[in-house]
Amino acid sequence: MSKRKKRLYAKLVILILCLIIVFRIFTLIWSRYESEGVSSANVDIAFYLLKEDFQDMTLNLAKIFPRNDAYIYTFSIGNQDEDKTAEIDMTYDLTLRTTTNLPLTYELYMNQDYGEDGATSIIETNEVEQDEDGTYFRVMTTNTEKLLYKEPKTNIYTLVVHFPENYNTTEYQDIIEMLEIRVDSRQLT
């Protein structure tokens, strides 16, 4: 190879390396200082308990990023669906299960606005457990609730997820969190 071709090749390699470095620095700076967003990530989910069974819904929290405002998710659990009502008295247990990829905190409110005075989170247990594959999950439960067939009722739940802005670092970039809502209903005896 001639000297001219070697110099041209060296310049090309240096140019490519410089472009890679500039691109990497740009992505680090952009992810670190991004702090604006419009989505409140409102997800309306309804669980209808018309018989004994369990239902679950999995939410992928891919668009969550650190900010001072909380993320709000709403869902409802009731014993009526349009013209159908459960024909038996029922109880249900509500379980929230999340991955532990991000440093999130959770609050859950039933039939109350989380911002009002005296509002209290109904999460009774909040534990980190390991499954058979070695994956860690946060499992949160509430007290058992009753739904009587003579009283058609729908409980409205507000899940508040906090991801404080002080976590706005590259360490948490492109990490996805999963949330599973599980409702296990049975006949009241």
Image: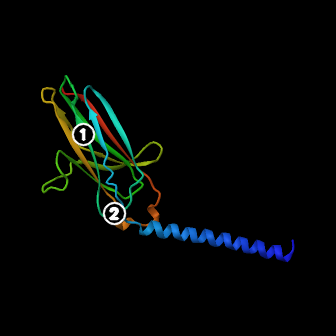
**x 82%, y 73%: residue:** 5
- Mark 2, residues whose alpha carbon is within 10 Å: few (<14), some, or many (≥20)? some
**x 27%, y 40%: residue:** 94
Residue 34 image point, x, y percent: 41, 66
Q: In the rendered view, how is the structure colored?
A: rainbow
**x 79%, y 76%: residue:** 7
Residue type at the position of mark 2: Arg
Q: Is residue 30 above or below residue 79?
A: below
Residue 179 image point, x, y percent: 37, 46
> Quick check: 49 left or right of 97?
left
Q: Is residue 30 above or below residue 112?
A: below
> Quick check: 111 left or right of 179?
left
Residue that carries the numbered disc 1 in the rendered image: 76
Local secondary structure at mark 2: loop
Q: Is residue 153 above or below residue 115?
A: above
Quarter that holds the C terminus? top left
Residue 87 image point, x, y percent: 19, 22
* Residue 124, disc: none
Residue type at the position of mark 1: Ser
Quarter that holds the N terminus? bottom right
Residue 68 image point, x, y percent: 30, 64
Residue that carries the numbered disc 2 in the rendered image: 67
